[in-house]
Image (cartoon, rainbow, N blue to C red):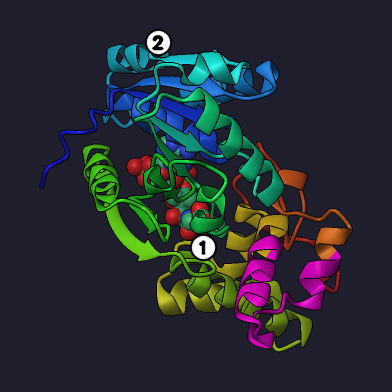
């Protein structure tokens, strides 16, 4: 395999949210120079604290030394100016909010500001790679690099080829994912790719089952946890991912395939409209207390 046209050393990650900070964490831990870019310095300061805390868990488990943690954190620089953040980048990974207009605007700017040989990857969970790439003049160097949450723990990287992605670029990202200790799997550019084409209908079906009164929150999640050995039940997972994110991915599937089977459950739509988004808002199917690991079903779904 010839990957000689690309030598990935400097990586820029756009977005300091959950996915962005997890991606920075993994690259910095693996020895890459990381530039974190966000419009909010405060969000990046918070992200660095989160990365430090997550690395502390690894130190406590002796999977990382205190010294390696300090070195890794020192490899992460923060920027609010895109030109500065990408001027030496070999790879940019965009992990901004899941919004097509925002992403296409970011890629237009990246195409202008990043070095000509820089690979532009997106961590999108459902937006078309081909559509994002069409906003650049380097469609061959645009690719999907979809990490899973929590990024330091989950082993998968779903790599998505856009219609015009160069084979060599796919190979580079495949090798790089392995260097990060991940298992890469390549998919093509169809709505939801593989991960969310399969995951989201399961989550939606769990919400429809709740909506129809087939069973309660705890029963649905326990059946899937104990019966299918899932680490989290589908309703807990929906809260963890964010109900707004689930809703928007289901809409991408629904519109992309034009098939009613992907239409978001009305209960999900209502919860999103009312601002009950799961972990990030403090309540979804469960009540979430950042200081407690106890799972408490929201009283909207109990008879109490
Ligand atoms: N960084 C580093 N380590 C972390 C971490 C983080 N952010 N989060 C958790 N960990 C570690 C913990 O230290 C712990 O390590 P040990 O077991 O070695 O002690 C381990 O991960 C498990 O964590 P916890 O004990 O806190 O909790 P848990 O056993 O309940 O596991 C979980 C938590 C890993 C999140 C597990 O519940 C799980 O795998 N859930 C499913 C996650 C999933 O499906 N993710 C994909 C979502 S879909 C997506 O991301 C993409 C999309 O497009 C929507």
Magenta span covers which residues? 247-270
Query: Mark 1 CB in 8 Å range of ligand 1?
Result: yes
Which residue is label 2 attached to?
Answer: 74
Is 269 one of the magenta-colored residues?
yes
Element class at badge 2:
helix
User: What secondary structure predominates along the stretch shown in magenta?
Assistant: helix
Q: Residue 121's spot in the image, x, y percent?
A: 44, 42
216 vs 176, left or right, is right
Element class at badge 1:
loop
Q: Residue furthest left?
A: 1
Q: Which mark is residue 246?
A: none
The image shows residue 55, relative to residue 224, as above or below, that is above
Q: Residue 170's spot in the image, x, y percent?
A: 29, 50
The image shows residue 5, relative to residue 154, as above or below, that is above
Q: CA distance from mark 2 to mark 1?
A: 34 Å
Q: Which mark is residue 232?
A: 1
Q: Is residue 5 visible?
A: yes
Q: Residue furthest front?
A: 137
Q: Residue 223's spot in the image, x, y percent?
A: 53, 79
- Which quadrant does the C terminus fall into? bottom right
237 vs 165, left or right, is right
33 vs 134, left or right, is left
Q: Is 83 in front, or is 43?
A: 83
Point 10% across, 47% down: residue: 1
């Amino acid at each position: 395999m010839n990957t000689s046209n690309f030598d990935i050393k400097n990586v820029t990650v756009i977005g300091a949210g959950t996915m962005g900070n997890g991606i920075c964490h993994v690259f910095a831990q693996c020895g890459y120079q990381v530039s974190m870019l966000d419009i909010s310095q405060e969000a990046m300061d918070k992200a660095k604290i989160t990365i430090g805390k997550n690395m502390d868990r690894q130190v406590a488990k002796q999977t990382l030394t205190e010294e390696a943690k300090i070195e890794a954190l020192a490899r992460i620089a923060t920027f609010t100016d895109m030109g500065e953040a990408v001027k030496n980048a070999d790879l940019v990974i965009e992990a901004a909010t899941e919004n097509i207009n925002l992403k296409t605007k970011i890629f237009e700017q990246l195409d202008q500001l990043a070095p000509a040989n820089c690979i532009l990857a997106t961590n999108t969970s459902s937006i078309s790679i081909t559509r994002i790439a069409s906003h650049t003049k380097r469609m061959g160097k645009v690719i999907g690099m979809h990490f899973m949450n929590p990024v330091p723990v989950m082993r998968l990287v779903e790599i998505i080829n856009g219609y015009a992605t160069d084979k060599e670029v796919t190979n580079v990202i495949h090798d790089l994912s392995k260097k990060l200790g991940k298992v890469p799997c390549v998919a093509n550019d169809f709505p939801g790719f593989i991960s969310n084409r399969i995951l989201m209908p399961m989550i939606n079906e769990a919400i429809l089952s709740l909506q129809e009164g087939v069973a309660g929150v705890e029963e649905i999640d326990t059946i899937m946890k104990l019966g299918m050995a899932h680490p989290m039940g589908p309703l807990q997972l929906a809260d963890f991912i964010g109900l707004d994110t689930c809703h928007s991915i289901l809409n991408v599937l629904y519109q992309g395939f034009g098939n009613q089977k992907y239409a978001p459950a009305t209960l999900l739509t209502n919860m999103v409209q009312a601002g009950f988004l799961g972990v990030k808002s403090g309540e979804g199917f469960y009540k979430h207390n950042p200081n407690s690991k106890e799972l408490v079903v929201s009283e909207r779904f109990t008879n109490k």
